Every structure is written in C-alpha cells, then in structure tokens.
Image: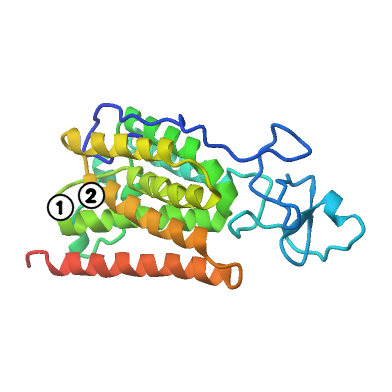
Amino acid sequence: MLPDQQGPVGPQPSSDSSGYRLPDCYRHPGRETGVSCTRCERPVCPECRVSASVGFHCRECVQGGQASVRAPRTEFGGRAVRDRALVTKILIGINVVVWGLQYLISSTALDHLYMQGQLVGQGQWYRMITSVFFHTAILHIGMNMWSLWVIGPALEQLLGRWRYLGLYLVSGLAGSALQLIVAPDVWALGASGAIFGLLGALVALQRKRGYQLGPILAIIFVNLLATFAIPGISWEAHVGGLVAGAVIGFGLAHAPERNRALVQWGTMALTLGVVLVLSLIGVAQLPG
C-alpha cells in the first residue's frame, strides 16, 4: 500500500503474505465461499446452499426437511451474492477514472479534490471524501489499487456489499477528520486511509473466526512504520482510518445473532457520528 501524500513517494511494503483466504465449498474444492450451513457449519458455495428461515443449509441437511425461502446471508450478515468483488471493482474504477482526468483537463481544476483542513473550514466539506478517491502519481494509485484488490474481495464476500462499502467510506472520512484536527494546513490525497480501515476491520473479523493474527498484524506494523519513517506522508489519514476500521470491524464481528443488523449498522452510524463531531471540533479550532 502506498500512503496518502502530497506527491509521489517510494513504495510502501504490503502483500497478502498472510495467506488469508476463504474456506472452500465442501463439494467444490478450490471454490472459496464465506457462507456456511447453519446446521452442520460446512462452507457452501451459491450452487450448493439452500436458503432457510434461519440462515442457509447445505443440500444434505435439507434432505428430509423443508427450508423456507430466504436470501442467503454471508458469514457476518450481509446478503450473499455471486460476484463477490463488485463494489471493489467499482471503487477501483472510480479511482482510476479520477486519476485519468488530470490528463484530460486542467490540473488546477482537480485542486478541489485535495484534503485541506483550512478549506474544509471555509465550507468545502466535500474534500473530506473526494480526497479518498484522488491520486496523482501512477505509482501511488497503482500500489493503493493493488492493495484494495488484494484485501477487498474477501472482505466484501464476508460482509456483503453494503457493509463493506460503509466500512470503506467511514474509514476514509475518519482519516480526513484526524488530519483536519492535527494538520489542517497539509494538502493530502489517496485511498490509503480507507484501505487501512479495511485492514483494521480484517483484524477483528479474523480474530472472531479464529484465524492467526500474526501475519496481518505484521503487515499493519510494516505499513505504519513506513508511514512515520517516510517524510511527506499523511500519517493522520492512516491512523484515523485504521482506528475507525477496527471499531467498525469489532461491531460487525461481535454483533449478537438477534438484532445483528441493527447492532452492526448502529456501530457504523455511531462511528460516523464521532467522525462528524471530531470534524466540527477541528473546524471550530481553526484560526478565524
């Protein structure tokens, strides 16, 4: 992952060396799935699961019983879909299109996309989110989009499209909010804050699933080390996104079965509310 920055910097180490992957369908080895049978807990792909009144069942468990019609859900409550990477593809597409615009229009017109706290204080609040989709250097966008492609699809499959999208956007806003408070004079851009949020959520989800956390924690540590070691990096966006993602991920992972959606979306809404309050505090502290 390459950090949010004011200009091109050297590559930031990141990889999928953790070996993280979804389990394979019990009938189709090599076909990953984030959905499990609520009776026998075997992982089932869309072709092998049958919707039920509570979750979803494998075909063997359905034999001798009858399952009521219900849309299958992911492991953490989202709606299970066939294309597990649709939102990730859309996010990458938006970033690439915005990056390409700088070669088609005046570069000064894109200055409105940067995150800059003083200008946010003058009413340009949109900068807090437009900066999350804005890159200038090809290495910057290349590394960030590669990181998003490595992390995103698995999380999208685990959470469902809307939970995943909410996690991404709130994490990006949290990074902008912390920069607004700590470094309002800095011009910053990039999706790294949102990607750090995905990493933070992944830690909570993996812990809940019983996976080893060492590899993913090592990746976060290396990226944070580079964040503070390389000059010109907006560490505020990285730390803000990471904290927000970890909080949201904890809520998504530990929501009780009963009222799960309410608790999950409530956690996300509460995190967003805190981000907005911090942003208002940051604006209030600006000179003038």
Q: Is residue 77 above or below residue 262?
A: above
Give the position of the N terminus as an image quadrant: top left
One can see residue 127 in this view = no
Are the two marked residues, 1 and 2, in contact with CB atoms closer than 8 angstroms? yes
Q: Residues within 10 Å of mark 2 (few under 14, many from 20)?
A: many
- Residue occupying image coordinates x 76% and y 64%: 70
Q: Which sits earlier in the primary sequence, circle 1 or circle 2?
A: 1
Q: Is residue 257 above or below residue 3?
A: below
Gap in angstroms between the C-alphas marked 1 and 2: 8 Å
- Using the image as rendered, state which of residue 274 and residue 253 is in the foreground: 253
- Using the image as rendered, state which of residue 45 and residue 166 is in the foreground: 45
Outermost residue, right side: 64
Q: Which residue is mark 2?
A: 236
Give the position of the C terminus as an image quadrant: bottom left
Q: Residues within 10 Å of mark 1 (few under 14, many from 20)?
A: some
Q: Which residue is mark 1?
A: 183
Q: Amino acid at mark 1?
A: Ala
The answer to which quarter of the image holds residue 176 is bottom left
Residue 105, given in percent of the width and then of the height, sits at 33, 38
> Element under label 2?
helix
- Using the image as rendered, state which of residue 131 and residue 156 is in the foreground: 156
- Residue occupying image coordinates x 18% and y 34%: 229
